[in-house]
Image: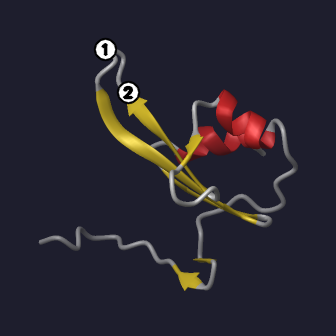
Amino acid sequence: MVDPLCGMDFTPTRYDNDIWMRFQRDKAGMLTAYNYMGCQAHDLNIVAEDAKSIMVQLTAVYEVVKPSLPSHHLNCIYSKETEDCLD
């Protein structure tokens, strides 16, 4: 998995080789966000503004069984809030 991720400008984090990150820049080259990917065995968890495009690039190289929104990852349960929870 290293070569495709490096080809997409991801680098492993300093303290955990299973967590990858890359800068997200706008058209002017300004840093706007970070994209993160957790890779553990056969599980991926992508945290990015456009996670779908990252998954499309990965499915071109690997067979991905069920790409979907995460419900759990590494024994953590995930849910999506429909309202802004910071109000």
- CA separation in Å, label 2 and label 1: 8 Å
For label 2, the crowd category at 10 Å Cα-Cα, with few meaning under 14, some 14 to 19 and many 20 or more, is few
Toward which corner of the image does residue 43 lie, by quadrant? Answer: bottom right
Considering only vertical position in the picture, is 25 above or below 34?
above
Judging depth in this view, the residue of 62 and 83 nearest the camera is 62
Considering only vertical position in the picture, is 48 above or below 3?
below
| Residue in the image at 62% along x and 40% along y | 54
Q: Is residue 60 left or right of residue 75?
A: right
Judging depth in this view, the residue of 68 and 31 nearest the camera is 31
Q: Say which quadrant the N terminus sits in.
A: top right
- Element carrying mark 1: loop
| Amino acid at pointer 1 | Ala
Mark 2, residue position: 25
The numbered mark at residue 12 is: none
For label 1, the crowd category at 10 Å Cα-Cα, with few meaning under 14, some 14 to 19 and many 20 or more, is few
| Amino acid at pointer 2 | Arg
| Residue in the image at 80% along x and 65% along y | 42
Considering only vertical position in the picture, is 63 above or below 7?
below
Mark 1, residue position: 28
- Measured as percent of width and height from the top left, residue 85 is found at 22, 73
Judging depth in this view, the residue of 82 and 27 nearest the camera is 27
- Element carrying mark 2: strand
- Measured as percent of width and height from the top left, residue 59 is found at 78, 43
Check whether the beta carbons of the residues at disc 2 and disc 1 lie within 8 A of each other: yes
Q: Say which quadrant the C terminus sits in.
A: bottom left
